Structure formats: C-alpha cells, structure tokens
Amino acid sequence: MFNKFTIADKLLFLAAFSSLIFSEILYFKGEKADATFMGMWVPSILAFGIYLKLINDSKNG
C-alpha cells in the first residue's frame, strides 16, 4: 500500500502528523493559543502536498 507514496509524500505526511501531535501536546500543557496556531498548520501542509501532487501529475500526463 505504501509503495505508491513518494519520499515527498511521506515527508509531508510526517510533517502534518508531527504538527498535529505537537499541537495536542501544547494544548494539554495549557498553551491553547499556540496549540491552535500549530493545529492550523495540518490542513495547510496537507493542501500543499495535494498541490504538489496535482502539479506533478499535470507535468507527467
């Protein structure tokens, strides 16, 4: 299943997942404003990954 993912896909997923985990850690430490800021990175990172995938597909196809 993971064979079709490129290194860039895996790194972007790791960055998004790390941002989510770090956001939750900040939230439970009581730093809610910082946690919200970090949590908003997750969809941005994933959207950037989708954008890169679409650009790559349009160049190849």
Image (cartoon, rainbow, N blue to C red):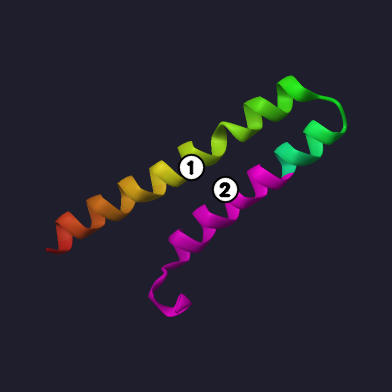
Q: Which element type, helix, strand or loop, lies under badge 1?
A: helix
* Horizontal arrangement in the rendering, residue 33 relative to residue 54 (left or right): right
- The verdict on residue 17 being magenta is yes
The type of residue carrying mark 1 is: Ile
The amino acid at mark 2 is Ala
Q: How many marks?
A: 2
Q: Is residue 60 left or right of residue 11?
A: left
* Near-viewer residue (57 or 17): 17
Between 57 and 32, the one lying in front of the other is 32
Structural distance between the alpha carbons of marks 2 and 1? 6 Å
In the image, is residue 15 part of the stretch drawn in magenta?
Answer: yes
Outermost residue on the right side: it is: 29
Mark number for residue 45? 1
Mark 1 burial class by Cα count in 10 Å: few <14, some 14-19, many 20+: some
Residue located beneath label 2 in the image: 16
Tell whether 38 sits left or right of 42. right
Q: Residue at x 72, y 20 (%)?
A: 33
Local crowd size for mark 2, using a 10 Å CA cut-off: few (<14), some (14–19), many (≥20)? many
State whether the magenta stretch is mostly helix, strand or loop: helix
**Image x and y of residue 9, in percent:** 44, 60
Residue 15 pos. (x, y %): 58, 50
User: Quick one: label 2 or label 1, which is nearer the N terminus?
Assistant: 2
Q: Position of residue 38 (x, y in %)?
A: 65, 32
The correct choice, above or below, for 12 with respect to 25 in the image is below
Please identify the quadrant where the N terminus is shown.
bottom left
What residue span does the magenta drawing correspond to?
1-21
Q: What quarter of the picture does the C terminus occupy?
A: bottom left
Callouts 2 and 1 close, C-beta under 8 Å: yes
**Residue sitting at x 59%, y 56%:** 14
In this view, the residue farthest toward the top is 33
